[in-house]
Structures are given as structure tokens and as C-alpha cells.
Amino acid sequence: MSLFQNIVIMALLIIGAGFLSLTEIALAGARKVKLKILAETGDDRAQKVLDLQENSADFFAASQIGLNAVAILGGILGEGAFRPYFLSLVSGFYTGPWADTISFSLSFTLVTSLFILFADLMPKRLAMIAPEKIAVAVINPIQIFIIVCKPLAWFINMIANLLFRLFKVNTTRDDNITFDDISAVMDAGAQAGVLQKQEHHFIENVFELEERNVPSSMTTRENVVFFTLKESEESIRQKLAEYPYSKFLVCNNNIDDVIGYVDSKDILVRILNNQSLLQLNENTIRNVLTIPDTLTLSELLDRFRSTKEKFAVVINEYALVVGVITLSDIMITVMGDWVTPIEEEQQIIKRDNNSWLIDGSTPIEDLKHALALDEMPEEENYETLAGFMMYKLRKIPRPADTVIFDAYKFEVVDVDHFKIDQLLVTRLLERSEPETDQSEATE
């Protein structure tokens, strides 16, 4: 054959091998979620790709048969087609015993390079760019190719299956999507600009509802405003004016003796109707939902949904009230500043790029978001920043006590009756040790 004919044959072989390489990567890399969306829009080819992915053994066997056959044939034909021309070229400046070997090496290098570049590397890189689109486009011709190779593919798959069983290899594909998978997709979407930063934050918070316990979002015991059965009318009016809450606990004598709760709307109706508020009674007091402090926020959402309530009292294992929580508190956990009342004092105040003034009652999850920390040390032992300081210092903190973790210095600024009110958190620009804890208590 002439040089032109050899070149045409080699080009056809390279195109065939390139098509198989393109198809193999596209069908393997096509994401099921996108294919299902295409199938739901009426594209039958997308459904064929899904079916092929479910039973891919025949396809991969046929693909390997085609790729190896073409590669071997290309090597045989290429070596015989191009070696005489390279031999003539080499003979022009070298006629020794190594001339034939040199021409063979040049011919082999040329054919191998052409197959690597045009039949392997470029097709696979193209397939990775848009695997779903390419998979849908090539599914019909590749099904014909699979039928042609079916007999030999069946024989090869039979041997492969026997070997898998012999070595007890599980060949079932696990398509379960984990939280890490979803998180990785969200991170990729945020980096690509598909998800806005705030949207990414919302989605992360929704998934954290399964991990965050109720105490991380509740109003703590010392901040709960409640009425007693003998509360004076003047005191009730004053609390309604001072605290713009929609619901108030009603207790007998102290906060641990809970009777129920009242809705501020019911009290306002009595005020508008000029009715006395001297005594709270069963007409205004409602039964309150009581929950343990071990519930997660996700479990509490289910409890709110089943009871049709939006307000709950949180108790600990000793039946003591540790706080109250509402549906709005959960929404604030998810939405953050978007639903936090403007007049409400912020728990985290950014002073500059390297320092924050943070309330001691700030939940650890909110702290990690603000400081871009993946985890805190042994965080299962505490819920708030104040708890973190007490856990690390192993004592009741005092002003100027500090803890250094990761690249941050946590310093106690204000303590009120053993309660840590505020801390100054500073990013350390230079650190001599990877992690140190220290306490500098003022006597």
C-alpha cells in the first residue's frame, strides 16, 4: 500500500479508538441526577444511558475489546507502514547495523504518540468536560457496537465474574448519597458561583439541624421572662412593654414550677376589653410543650410539627428548666442575621479582620462559622464558647484568662457572677507552637 493509504487507515483506527475512549469516560462519568432530569424532560437517550450504567459489564467488555483490538492492529500496520520510510531517512546519514532498530523505534514512537494524543488523552479530556451531553449523543451507536461484540464480551465477563467470586469482590455499585457528597457538591457550587455565599450558609445550617442540640439555640434559663400566678397587673403590663415576646411562661412560685404559658395576644385582648389582669386563669394559660435538653433541633422540628406548637420548655435530667425555645429560634439558627431582629444584641461583633468581640453564650456552631473553623477540640463536651473556656481552663474563668487554639487567642473580657459575658478573640499572625493553652488569672 502507498503511504497515503497507510495514513488513511491509521487515521480511521485512531478515530475509532478515540470514539471508544470518549464514550467510555462519558458513560462512566455521567451523573445520574442530571441524566434523570433529562429523562424526565422526555429524552429517551438519557434513560438508555441510565439503563446502561445499571448493567455496564457488557459495555466495558465491548469497549476494551475494541480499544485493544484497534491498538494492536494500529501497532502492526503502523510499524510495517512507516518503518521503510524511516529506514530510508536514517540511511541518509547512518548505514550501520543499528539502522533497522533506529527506524523501528522511530516508527513505534510515532504510532504510539498518535494513539496517546488523539485516541486516548484528548478524547478523555473532552469527555470530562460534558459527560452527560456526550453520553446522550453516543448512546445509540454504542449500543449497536455492544451487540456486535456481545458473544466475546459474554465470554470475557464470565471469566471476570468467576475471578471476582473467587476473591470475594463485591461488584455492586453503591449509589447512596452521603452528607459529605452533598457538602462537596455545595462547596463546588459556591466556588463556581452557582450558589451565593449566603445560600451556601443556609444549606449548611439546615444539615446542621441534625447535629445541633436544643441548648445551642434556646433562650437560657437566666434570660427567660415569666409570670407567676400572683403576678400583679402592673408587673404584667411592665413586662409586656419591656420584653416584646409573643409568649411568656407562667409558673407557680419559681421557674422550675411551670404551669403553662400565655400568649401576649390574649393578654392584650383583655387589656383592650378593659378586663382585669389581676389573676391569670385557665382561660388564658395554655399547656406548654416540655422537651428534654438532649433533643436535636431536627427532632424538635418534628415535635413542633406533630403537636402544632411553636413554643417549648427545655428541661434537664434533674427536671430543672434550663431554657425555652421557639420555632423562630430554629429559623434564626438556619437563616442567621436575615431573620434576627435588628434591635437584638449581636453575639459576634467583628472589630477588624483579625479580632472579634463574642458573647460567652454564643453556640459553638456559630463560632465555627464566624472564625472559619472546621472543628473545636472535643466539642461534644460543651455547647457554647463559655463552655469551651471552662472546659479548657478546668476552672471558672476570670477576666484576662486566655486559651490559645489553632490560630486564635480567646481572652475573657467580662465576667458577671461566674458567667462569662464577653470574650475577645484574636487571630494570631505568628505562632511558635501549633496549639497551646494558658491561663493568666488575675488575683
Image (spheres, rainbow, N blue to C red):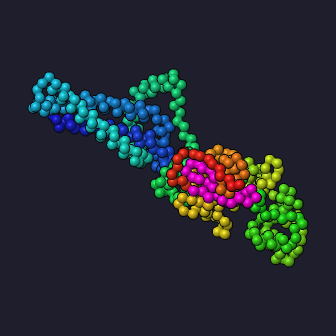
- Whole-percent x, y for residue 25 in the image: 40, 40
User: Foreground residue, 75 or 53?
Assistant: 75
Q: Of all residues shown, which one is farthest toward the front?
A: 443
27 sits to left or right of 433: left
Query: Is residue 311 visible to us here?
Result: no
54 sits to left or right of 318: left
Q: Does the segment drawn in magenta span residue 420?
A: yes
User: Foreground residue, 353 or 185?
Assistant: 353
Q: Quadrant of the C terminus?
A: bottom right
Q: What is the span of residues highlighted in magenta in the rendered image?
A: 402-426
Q: Quadrant of the N terminus?
A: top left
- Whole-percent x, y for residue 85 in the image: 15, 32
Q: Residue at x 62, y 61 (%)?
A: 357
- Whole-percent x, y for residue 46 in the image: 46, 46
**Which SS type dominates the magenta stretch?**
strand
224 sits to left or right of 406: right
Residue 26 sits in quarter: top left
User: Foreground residue, 212 or 355?
Assistant: 355
